[in-house]
Amino acid sequence: MALDVRLINFITQELAQGIAKRLARLTLVLLCVALVSFGLMMASPIDPIDAYLGPQMAQVSPEQRELIAQRWGFDAPPVVQFSHWLRQLLSGDLGWSHVYNQPVSEVIGQRFQRSIALLGGAWLLSALLGFSLGVVAGAKEGSTLDKIISTYAYITASTPAFWLAILAVLLFSVFLGWTPTCCAGPTGILSQQVSLAQRLHHLVLPIATLALLGIANITLHTRHRMLEFMRSEVATHAFAQGASRLDVAWRHGIRHACLPAMTLAFASLGELFGGSILIEQVFAYPGLGQATVAAGLRSDIPLLLGIALFTALFVSIGNLMADSLYGVIDPRIKLGDL
């Protein structure tokens, strides 16, 4: 009984230390992200007052410019601006967006509700299809199917996201007329009146375009891992016993390739978010990516810092989920960590 209590206490302490280390690393990462984002904004040649005024900057007097600078803190030194924002953050306030004239938390919440459907759909599609294509290509090394999948993956991986999105709009929206050209719903209709079918219709092409970028990387990585396994002694022994390549890949190769593929899939969340910024611009989709561009072009420092922190937290949670799933797929990892 005493041994069981000591074992439980030891496991509890190890888990507590692990959680504390993760929280400390996450805090350090978020602070570094905030500092780098703020530094880039300060180094930007865009004048924050001109960006705030937009086309009306020529109609504003110097006195009015001073009042605007005082109102939003544009005239304060960079250290003072960052310190003020950091104090607000520690109190639970992300600040106020002068672009949308709303609290930053509300802007992120509203925009992320639209972007989560785009990012989630593209991520799920890229993970499933990318892993499946990589397994098939690795199991059929040198075949025509392997060459087709590899060629597709290499071409897609080297294709810029915005160029692929423009081609998709021209082909499926302009020439074929199968999908809408822009927006999250039909123009001229209130958001509350847009049906689920209409939202999905506007999401199909952006999701497919964004997913193509993620599919290529996961496919190539999974194929490489499968080729390593198919050339290993374990696979050679299975072949000697009469097993086919597909049977070996299905029974043993998938487990060998799924852990690296899972890591890459969760790590690609940040890459998908970066791609969604370009995709949302091309499709005029009102999501978090479009808000990021607006914050950068109009020097909305609180909004940009808030989005940067939210994105870093989002990607970190994804990596944490991947680490947690390791123990489910391979119990040896779980036992080793304890």
Image: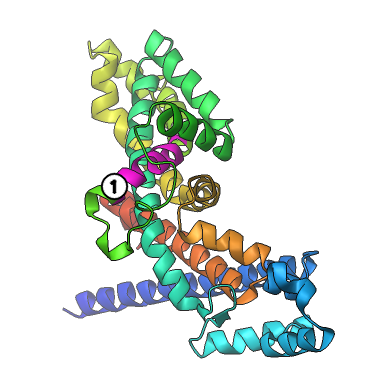
Task: Name the outermost residue toward the right.
Answer: 62
Name the residue that disc number 1 marks: 200
Q: Is residue 76 magenta?
A: no
Please tell me how many numbered marks the rendered image carries: 1
Instruction: Identify the image quadrant of residue 304.
Output: bottom right
Q: Residue 4 placed where, x, y %?
A: 20, 75
Quick one: quadrant of the N terminus? bottom left
Q: Left or right of 85: which side holds 135?
A: left
User: How would you rate the neighbour count of disc 1 (Cα within 10 Å): few for under 14, some for 14-19, many for 20 or more?
Assistant: some
Q: Position of residue 297 (x, y in %)?
A: 67, 62
Q: Quadrant of residue 75?
A: bottom right
Residue 136 point in image, percent of width and height: 34, 22
Q: Nearer the viewer, residue 101 or 230?
A: 101
Dominant SS of magenta comes to: helix
Question: Looking at this view, is 247 or 305 the one in front?
Answer: 305
Residue drawn at x 35%, y 53% is 185
Q: Quadrant of the C terminus?
A: bottom left
Give residue 305's position: percent from left, percent from top.
60, 72
Q: Is residue 330 visible?
A: no
**Looking at the image, residue 240 lies above or below residue 192:** above
Image position of 254 with respect to 47: above or below = above
Q: Secondary structure at mark 1?
A: helix
Report if residue 164 is visible in the image: yes
Image quarter of residue 111: bottom left
Residue at image position (74%, 76%) is: 49
Q: Is residue 200 above or below residue 247?
A: below
**Horizontal placement of 325 versus 51: left or right?**
left
Magenta segment boundaries in residue numbering: 199-212
Amino acid type at image mark 1: Leu
